[in-house]
Image (cartoon, rainbow, N blue to C red):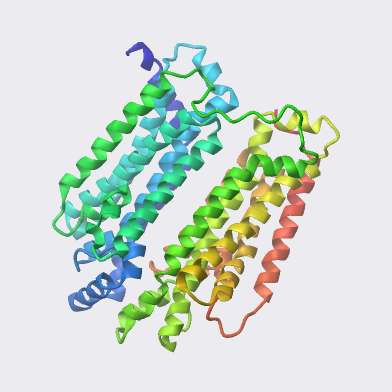
């Protein structure tokens, strides 16, 4: 076994050096969200009575329980764990799966791993180094969370930090298994992300039920374990043992799989195409390459829309005469919360439409950057050596990216309408209104790929920043000038907006077109990646 791990230290140092920018950014974002929450909550709920009132209101409302989980205490620490614990854990999970896939399957796909393994590198050393790199990042998150919240109570701060880090480590191991099963880095990330999405839906469905955090679906999700640690509310330390057992089981499975396949191979290889090709255009090839991703995102958005649409009416039941809980709804992004239950329902649907838009931006970036993957994998060069121009090649992928964004948002709106049981047209309009901002972020990814392909991955930071600003920024009381850095802040909030101003929609769309054109122009002039 010692020979199998030869070179692990050198590979770990290489991974940390390569991620010297990416990793600190993820760590800081995942940790600062819960660390900054007590100050924000304390400014809104200054007294113990107000905190007890909001805790009781949230616990009797299925919509809020589905979004944030049950509240187990009324201290600032307990409210911080309720409001930010799971979302910080989701960020740690996303960070971890990206790190592991980047240093395993992506290295094999580009051929760099073969060069490294030609030296004195053990068979399981790359996987071990990738898992250790993810572990280092998660330990940093745990230390920052525990240190930043120690003033609210050391035991609770340590419990929350460990729960967030344990979730990240859990999904690092999930990504390690996905990297053995799938043939490409894209498929490995998609598989691990699908598991993360399923875990969130399970937790939301379980929390929305009468059992709250005690229901079976909640306990079936690792994100449900985060809330059941009950940080700052009589901590349940034994729940962390579930993470330990799951991490050990997944790590063992990943090691077994890694030892039973050849370098570059996978247990679920891509199916070969027909003996005679039927793809007549570059666009058809782009659809063939990305259709699995489009269909997966479409199904996920439709199901999530139905789930969240069914919770919409609960937003009105939450408020009643409680001004403080009314503020929570308004901070979530809705307008017109003073207009009664109908306005509150519209506010909740508008918030969900905005969330779908911000998540759809991640799909747009992923789809556009398929261009970079095809180019760096040297699959684009043979294609372009024939009678296929660069613009036709890139245009096919961009059509799938922008058209796919429209499709998944359409299905999200349809799901919201079906789940809500009425106003389907308004729900679809609300989600489609997010398209200009989604297209703008996708266009920025296209521009980066065309001008500076080496840094095209920076588009992920833009999409992630927009998601953080839109979803967590209002709760942190960030200045409006900061929130306006996200293109989503300039969109009309539908349904419920009294006057629909089309100017921001047209301006964002025009800017997206201009950035896309600039990116294509730069791609046409520069050398292809060797």
372 and 203: which is toward the camera: 203
In the image, residue 201 sits, relative to residue 334, either above or below, namely above
Residue 444 shows in this picture: yes
In the image, residue 514 sits, relative to residue 295, either above or below, namely below
261 and 449: which is toward the camera: 261
Across and down, in percent, residue 233 comes to: 16, 59
Across and down, in percent, residue 452 comes to: 67, 42
Left or right of residue 363: residue 196: left
Across and down, in percent, residue 153 comes to: 17, 57
Q: Furthest residue to the right? A: 387
Across and down, in percent, residue 302 comes to: 52, 59
In the image, residue 314 sits, relative to residue 7, either above or below, namely below
Residue depicted at x 58% and y 70%: 428
Residue 473 shows in this picture: no
Q: In the rendered image, which quarter contains the C terminus? A: top right
Left or right of residue 85: residue 261: right
Give the total of numbered labels: 0
Residue depicted at x 40% and y 76%: 313
Q: Quadrant of residue 129?
A: top left
Q: Quadrant of residue 11?
A: top left
444 and 354: which is toward the camera: 354
Residue depicted at x 16% and y 51%: 236
Q: In the rendered image, which quarter contains the N terminus? A: top left
Left or right of residue 403: residue 101: left
Q: Furthest residue to the left? A: 234
In the image, residue 423 sits, relative to residue 364, either above or below, namely below
């Amino acid at each position: 076994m010692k020979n199998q791990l030869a070179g692990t230290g050198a590979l770990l140092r290489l991974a940390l050096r390569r991620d010297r920018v990416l990793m600190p950014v993820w760590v800081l974002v995942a940790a600062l969200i819960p660390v900054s929450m007590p100050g924000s909550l304390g400014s809104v709920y200054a007294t113990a009575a107000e905190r007890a009132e909001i805790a009781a209101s949230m616990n009797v409302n299925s919509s809020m329980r589905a979004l944030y989980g049950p509240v187990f205490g009324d201290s600032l620490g307990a409210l911080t764990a309720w409001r930010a614990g799971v979302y910080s854990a989701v960020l740690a999970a996303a960070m971890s799966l990206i790190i592991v896939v980047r240093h395993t399957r992506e290295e094999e796909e580009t051929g760099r791993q073969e060069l490294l393994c030609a030296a004195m590198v053990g068979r399981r050393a790359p996987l071990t180094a990738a898992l250790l790199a993810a572990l280092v990042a998660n330990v940093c998150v745990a230390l920052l969370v525990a240190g930043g919240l120690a003033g609210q109570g050391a035991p609770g701060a340590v419990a929350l930090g460990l729960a967030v880090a344990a979730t990240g480590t859990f999904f690092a191991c999930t990504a390690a298994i996905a990297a053995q099963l799938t043939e490409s880095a894209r498929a490995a990330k998609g598989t691990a992300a699908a598991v993360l999405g399923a875990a969130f839906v399970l937790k939301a469905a379980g929390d929305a039920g009468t059992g709250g955090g005690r229901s079976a679906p909640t306990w079936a999700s690792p994100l449900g374990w985060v809330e059941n640690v009950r940080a700052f509310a009589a901590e349940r330390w034994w729940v962390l043992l579930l993470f330990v057992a799951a991490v050990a089981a997944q790590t063992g499975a990943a090691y077994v799989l890694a030892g039973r396949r050849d370098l570059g191979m996978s247990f679920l290889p891509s199916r070969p195409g027909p003996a005679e090709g039927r793809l007549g255009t570059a666009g058809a090839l782009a659809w063939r390459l990305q259709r699995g991703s489009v269909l997966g995102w479409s199904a996920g958005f439709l199901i999530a829309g139905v789930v969240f649409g069914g919770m919409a009416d609960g937003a009105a039941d939450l408020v009643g005469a409680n001004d403080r809980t009314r503020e929570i709804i308004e901070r979530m992004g809705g307008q017109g919360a003073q207009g009664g239950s109908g306005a509150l329902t519209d506010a909740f649907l508008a918030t969900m439409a905005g969330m779908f838009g911000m998540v759809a931006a991640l799909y747009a970036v992923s789809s556009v950057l398929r261009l970079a993957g095809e180019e760096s994998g040297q699959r684009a060069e043979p294609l372009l050596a024939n009678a296929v121009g660069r613009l036709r090649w890139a245009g096919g992928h961009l059509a799938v990216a922008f058209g796919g964004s429209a499709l998944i948002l359409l299905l999200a709106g349809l799901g919201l309408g079906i789940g809500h049981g009425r106003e389907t047209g308004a729900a679809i309009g609300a989600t489609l209104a997010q398209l200009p901002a989604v297209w703008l972020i996708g266009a920025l990814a296209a521009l980066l790929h065309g001008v500076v392909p080496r840094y095209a991955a920076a588009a992920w930071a833009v999409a992630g920043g927009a998601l953080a600003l839109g979803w967590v920024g209002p709760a942190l009381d960030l200045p409006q000038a900061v929130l306006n850095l996200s293109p989503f802040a300039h969109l009309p909030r539908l349904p419920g907006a009294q006057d629909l101003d089309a100017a921001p929609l047209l301006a964002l769309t025009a800017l997206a077109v201009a950035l896309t054109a600039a990116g294509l122009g730069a791609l046409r002039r520069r050398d292809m990646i060797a």
